Image: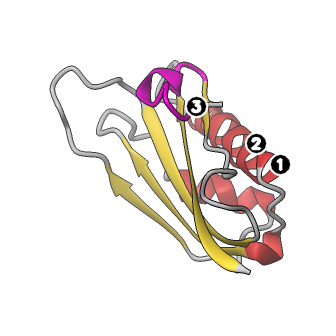
Amino acid sequence: MRVRAFRGATQLQSDSSKEMEEAVCELLLDIFKENAIANEDLISILFTATPDLLCEFPAKTARSLNLGSVPLMCAVEIDVAGALPRVVRVMVHAHSDLTLEAARHVYRRGAEVLRRDIAQ
């Protein structure tokens, strides 16, 4: 079994803790489902958020998915002029038998425009 990285992103309509939890949990569950990832397959998850999201750490909301033993880290996305606002990006590192080409990267809630080439 190899180590793979699975990407994804979601866009929030507003900077609210409730929406952060809903959007991040939805995104992670979709990535796990699309790639047949079980909790025991997880190695770590890296989150970035655009500088306009201040309501909550994405990692804190992810812990509601029983990810307490998985290393989670948050960072601020670089503030590029004209970038899509209110976006949480994620990179999930997991053990997987999927090939690089078979890995499914998940973009939701308007974030599909970030990577039309790989968004599912």
Whether tag 1 and tag 3 are in contact, CB under 8 A, the answer is no
Q: Is residue 113 left or right of residue 52?
A: right
Residue 81 horizontal/vertical position (percent): 15, 25
The answer to if 116 sits in the magenta stretch is: yes
Mark 3 falls on what kind of element? loop
**Colouring used for the render:** secondary structure
Q: Is the magenta stretch mostly helix, strand or loop?
A: loop
Q: Which label's residue is closer to the chain start, 1 or 3?
A: 1
Specify the label residue 52 is tagged with: none
Which residue occupies the foreground of this view, 26 or 5? 5
Q: What's the residue type where badge 1 is placed?
A: Lys
Q: What element carries label 2?
A: helix
Tell me what residue is drawn at x 75 percent, y 57 percent.
Answer: 64
Nearer the observer: mark 1 or 3; the answer is 3
Q: Amino acid type of disc 3?
A: Ala
Q: Where is residue 102 in the image (x, y as percent from the top left)?
A: 69, 51
The residue to which callout 3 is attached is 119
Query: Label 2 near label 1: C-beta < 8 Å?
Result: yes
For the point 73% across and 68% down, the residue is 67
Q: Is residue 46 left or right of residue 83?
A: right
Label 1 sits on residue: 33
Q: Name the residue under label 2.
A: 30
